[in-house]
Amino acid sequence: MTMIKVAETDEEIDKCYPVMAELRPHVAREDFLHQVRRQMAASGFQLVYLSVGSDIKAVAGIRIAEWLARGKSLDLEDLVSAESDRSKGFGGKLFDWIVDLARKEDCTEVRLVSHVTRYRAHRFYLNKRMRLDAHFFSMSLNSKE
């Protein structure tokens, strides 16, 4: 049975790690739970997942925020399907659930940032009727870069 749920317990968050690590391999397993909990407390971050039975197939990190420029939006920070389950519709179902959540929360838009080299992801987002409407600038504050 397919289910989409917000990860609330430590066990649920931890079970999301193997799929999320495919997108965010720099986050060590021993740091994952603490980081997710810190983000949840600080800014309303939520980890949502799609499972079939006990197997997690797709995971997303989201938060709802308000901006002077655009109003209330749902920011989709992470969206990943397990490599072995890509192109099976799991990411699409989770994406559609997130869009429905944004509507229920009276958001004016769903936004995301995707690295410029993630062409497969860009194709997915464009097929989901998202548009490319901004440039994202960043500045590293790490002295090693």
Image: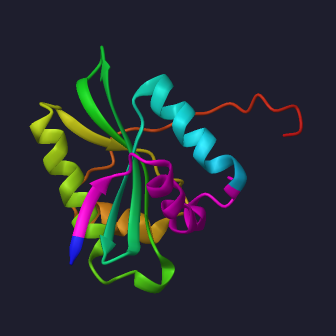
Q: Which span of residues is magenta-colored?
A: 3-29
State the residue in front, 39 or 37: 37
| Quadrant of the rendering where the N terminus is positioned | bottom left
Whether residue 129 appears in this view of the structure is no
* Residue drawn at 46 percent across, 38 percent down: 135
102 in magenta: no
Whether residue 68 sits left or right of residue 115 in the image: it is left
* Residue drawn at 44 percent across, 72 percent down: 120
Q: How many marks?
A: 0
Whether residue 145 sits left or right of residue 68 in the image: it is right
Residue 40: x, y in percent? 46, 33
Q: Quadrant of residue 128?
A: bottom left
Q: Is residue 54 above or below residue 94?
A: below
Whether residue 50 appears in this view of the structure is yes
State the residue in front, 54 or 44: 54
Whether residue 96 sits left or right of residue 11 in the image: it is left
Q: Is residue 66 above or below residue 14?
A: above
State the residue in front, 31 or 10: 10
12 in magenta: yes
Colour convention: rainbow
* Residue drawn at 18 percent across, 40 percent down: 102
Residue 123: x, y in percent? 35, 68
| Quadrant of the rendering where the C terminus is positioned | top right
Whether residue 43 sits left or right of residue 66 in the image: it is right
Residue 34: x, y in percent? 62, 40
Residue 41: x, y in percent? 48, 26
Residue lying farthest to the right in this orientation: 144
Residue lying farthest to the top in this orientation: 68
